[in-house]
Image: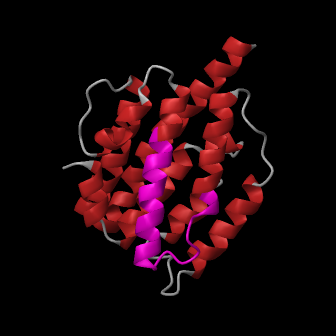
Amino acid sequence: MSLVELIARADERGLAASGLACLDRCVPLLGGDDEVLRPLWMSLTDASADASGEDWSMSLEQARDQLAGTPEGEDDAEDEAVLLARSMLAHAPADRTAAADVRTWSDACSVASLEIHRLLDAGDDEDLAEARREGRTEGMSPLVAAELRRQITVLELLAGHGGAGLRPALEVCTEGRRVLRAVVSRRARVRG
């Protein structure tokens, strides 16, 4: 099933986790540590989430405060990637139970995260963005292909396991964050 189809079929928790995972993998661009979005992940669990979504809303505001005013990238591609990552955070809905808003945000995060990975991997063709999301992978760079697989995996984990899929989804996200952190570090060394 394509990424577009998975997003279309996802429930509210799957959509929130998908958008959050895309944002979390891009946290290295915002200067955040590995734990900055952990409270948002916790708010998606049945045990800690309340019916009004206040845990999500409060955690989102804390994350925005912690990631405010972080440094820009070192080159044009990184500057654009940083702006896309900031946009994901800025547009996160305060109410994670508003299905239409969460679906729009999740879809936008998917596109932004793929674009960030494309920008940081000069070997990928920007004209193929929507084709990738629809499942066509020819001409895709390894960095973008890995991000696409991670997005699909997160949505499949949540669709197949519900709340029990959050932990493995977070593990997929952690791996992607490490990869992006390494890419950003490598680019800094090359410029260096």
Q: Is residue 80 magenta?
A: no
Asked if residue 28 can be seen in this view, the reply is no
Residue at the left extreme? 1
Q: Residue at x 42, y 25 (%)?
A: 124
Residue 182 vs 158, above or below: the answer is above
Residue 177 vs 152, above or below: the answer is above
| Number of marks in the rendered image | 0
Q: Position of residue 187 (x, y in %)?
A: 64, 20
Report the front residue among 115 and 21. 115
Report the front residue among 84 and 25. 84
Q: Position of residue 39 (x, y in %)?
A: 60, 64
Q: Position of residue 9 (x, y in %)?
A: 25, 65
| Helix, strand or loop for the magenta stretch, by majority | helix
Is residue 47 left or right of 178 when viewed as pictured?
A: left
Q: Residue at x 24, y 41 (%)?
A: 135
Is residue 177 left or right of 29 when viewed as pictured?
A: left
Q: Position of residue 68 (x, y in %)?
A: 77, 55
From which residue to which does the magenta span run? Answer: 89-114
